[in-house]
Image: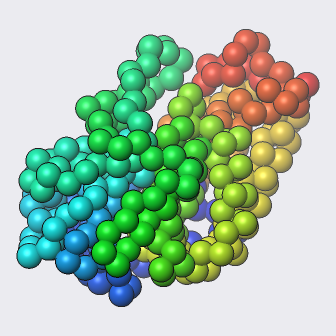
Amino acid sequence: MTSAPDDIPFDRTMAAKPEELQRVSPLVRRLVANNGGPFTFTGTCTYVVGRGEVAVIDPGPADADHVAAIMAAVAGETVRHILVTHTHRDHAPGAALLKAATGAEVAGPPRRAARPDDPSLPALDAAFDLRYGPDRVLGEGDAVEGPGYRLVAVATPGHSSDHLAFALPDEDALFSGDHVMAWSTTVVAPPDGSMRAYMASLRKLQGRDDAVYWPGHGGPVRAPRAFVKALVLHRQMREGAILRRIAAGDATVPALVASLYRDLAPSLRGAAGLSVLAHLVDLVADGQVAADGPATLKARYAAA
């Protein structure tokens, strides 16, 4: 999540209180964790799919109260699968707690290894649940099934290298995690996030026929194709704006953020800088921008 560009039809209406169970479709119920903030909007959306025997998607942070709310929501039912879209701490840690309470299979991306610290970047390992460990690793096209539901993994790297979405063909729906959200653009933070992968994943979704997205934060995306098209155009416009500002003499990431995000809250400038860096990584790799070394937050940039 970064700025609020006018070229994207955001919807920031979210009629859901923390830990209030809502049925949002015939097969889908939603609980919102009580972890709202600048990057999580009103909180992480946890979805319960099916009836009687169910799957839980993104059980959220390591919050015993949220897991207790999930258990209350499925009282009298059996949790058969626990699915994780990606291993950020606001999505994955609840999986271990929910598994301990239910014995259900945890399925999703592979276990994430710690990475060496890079002094030029934030301590991004702090963003990931390094204790997450799936019983079953899912990749493109892998499916989990229960009575009355089938969920199919769709690889959507970009926001994180391990990001998955989950399609629910019975309702032409896609659980889009943090890849596409109705309320905001998505943070793409190197080195784990990749703008090139993110754009490729957006174009991949443009080739699908989903009728609705259920995101990891905020309300649904009701016109997915038009919304994703707007996201693609916005990123293309952002890339063009970066090239113009570099040609005008903005040589650092802070200078570019100051020019491109004039009305951005100070608390979000770090995220904006990482998204700018994600564009710069690609522009340097493509030979459109020159850097005085590797493309980092501290590098200086010039037109190639």
Q: Is residue 295 above or below residue 192?
A: above
Would you say 295 lies left or right of 123 here? right
The residue at 48%/81% (across/down) is 171
Would you say 63 lies left or right of 291 here? left
Instruction: Tell me which colouring the rendered structure shows.
Output: rainbow
The residue at 42%/52% (across/down) is 85
Q: Nearer the viewer, residue 204 or 39?
A: 204
Q: Position of residue 266 (x, y in %)?
A: 47, 44
Q: Position of residue 86 (x, y in %)?
A: 42, 46
Q: Position of residue 43 (x, y in %)?
A: 31, 61
Q: Is residue 13 above or below residue 87?
A: below
Q: Name the quarter where the C terminus is drawn.
A: top right
For the image shown, how many numbered marks are present on the structure? 0
Q: Is residue 7 above or below residue 261?
A: below
Q: Nearer the viewer, residue 190 or 155?
A: 155
Tell me if I can see residue 23 in this picture: yes
Would you say 55 lies left or right of 208 here? left
Tell me if I can see residue 258 in this picture: no
Q: Residue furthest right?
A: 304
* The image quarter in which residue 75 lies: bottom left
Q: Nearer the viewer, residue 89 or 172?
A: 172
The residue at 69%/58% (across/down) is 204
Q: Position of residue 157 (x, y in %)?
A: 58, 45
Q: Is residue 293 above or below residue 272?
A: above
Q: Residue furthest bottom?
A: 26
* The image quarter in which residue 297 lies: top right
The residue at 14%/52% (across/down) is 103
